[in-house]
Image (tube, rainbow, N blue to C red):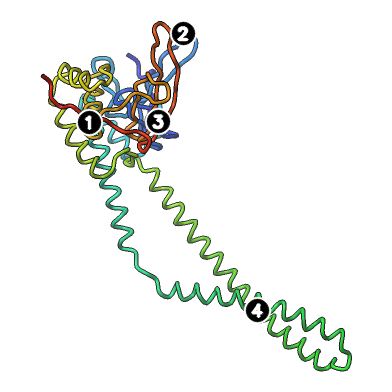
Amino acid sequence: MSAKELKFDYASSSRAGCKGCKMKIQKNELRIGLETLFQGEHTTTSWRHLECFSLGRKYKDIDPKEIEGYYDLKKEDKARVIDYFEGGGQKKSVVDKLISTITDSEKKKKQDDDGDDNQVYDYDAEQQKKKNQQQKEKKKITKPKLKRKLSSSSEEEDDSSDSEDDFDDSETDNSGSDSDYEKEKAIQRKNQHKKLARKKKSKGKSKSSTEINIGYTPEQLLKFKENLKLYEKKTAEYLKALLGINNQPKTGTKDELVLKCADGKTLGQIPICSECGGGKLRYDIQTGIYKCPGYMDDDVFQHCGKKFTNEQIVRLPWIDDII
């Protein structure tokens, strides 16, 4: 096989799914694509996580440096690619990949939480903020006062000298107010830059390749990880039988059967779609969203596509005994 069929890239969004583990490839995460010819005319690319791509006999002798996009990768990712190819490219199972991703996500979240706890209350900044607010209120009062004095000076000629004095005083006050106003604007600009910097930092965190959205609470996530390890040791025949007695779909690879059983034991049986009354809902563990694919009614396929959230679905008790 030729290296021209393959290419490296960083995911431009989190929409594409990995053809290996079926999970979403997170934005900016390293991926490897396999290009194939569709209907003899169009080229399509199927994407996988690096560790979900099996070299096997087809690509074991390929030099990764010959693959398109290799030299555009980051230094650490180049080393990661070389290590993977030199190691024979033994892909991770879906279960290993999911556990690894969840663990990395938990570590990242803990680090972020610890960072937030270490933030110190800035007393001087709070006092400056209050002072700026007071200056702003003073400026609002000063300008209407100046207008009233100008109006009174035009109506009363006899008190022109007094009015001029008042006008001069007002001008002085206004000049000082303008100075305060400029200072206030400078502080506002500085604060705005700080907000933008924090926003960029927060945005950068959300793009981390270790982050993943899981449709479980922290307690459910721990149980889910335990159940993954439990069912990974079972045979495919056992898992299909278990899904059968729980009225769940029995199709898919061994890894997919493990995921379905682990999810069922964690949250319970997924019920039939309440919208169409016949579709078996599919649960996306990364988003926590249920979607109905529709169902066959005799010889006619009934489309549905209805989506539900966790709050809208009531799971049934999971049966964990096979007689």
SS assignment at label 1:
loop
Q: Provide the residue designation for mark 3.
A: 9
Q: Give me the C-alpha separation between circle 1 and circle 4.
A: 70 Å
Residue under the point 32% across and 38% down: 215
**Mark nearer the N terminus (3 vs 4):** 3
First of labels 2, 1 by sequence position: 2
Verify CB contact (< 8 Å) between mark 4 and mark 2. no
Q: Mark 1 = which residue?
A: 317
Mark 2 Cα-neighbour bin, 10 Å: few <14, some 14–19, many ≥20: few
Measure how far apart labels 4 and 2 are at the Cα level: 74 Å
Secondary element under disc 2, as helix, strand or loop, is: loop
Point out the image quarter for the C terminus: top left
Residue 202 position within the rendered picture, expressed as x and y whole percent measured from the top left: 41, 51
Q: State which tag comes first along the sequence, 1 or 4.
A: 4
Query: Which label sits in the foreground, 1 or 4?
Result: 1
Amino acid, disc 3: Asp
Proximity of marks 3 and 4: CB atoms separated by less than 8 Å: no
Specify which label sits upstream in the sequence, 2 or 3: 3
Residue indicated by mark 2: 39
Q: State the SS at label 3.
A: strand
Tell which of 303 and 165 is nearer to you.
303
SS under mark 4: helix
Number of the front mark, 3 or 4:
4
* Residue wearing tag 4: 177
Sequence-wise, the earlier of marks 4 and 2 is: 2
**Residue at x-position 54% and y-position 69%:** 187
Q: Earlier in the sequence, mark 1 or mark 3?
A: 3
Count the numbered circles shown.
4
Query: Mark 2 to mark 1: distance in Å?
Result: 46 Å
Q: Report the Cα–Cα distance between label 2 and label 3.
A: 25 Å
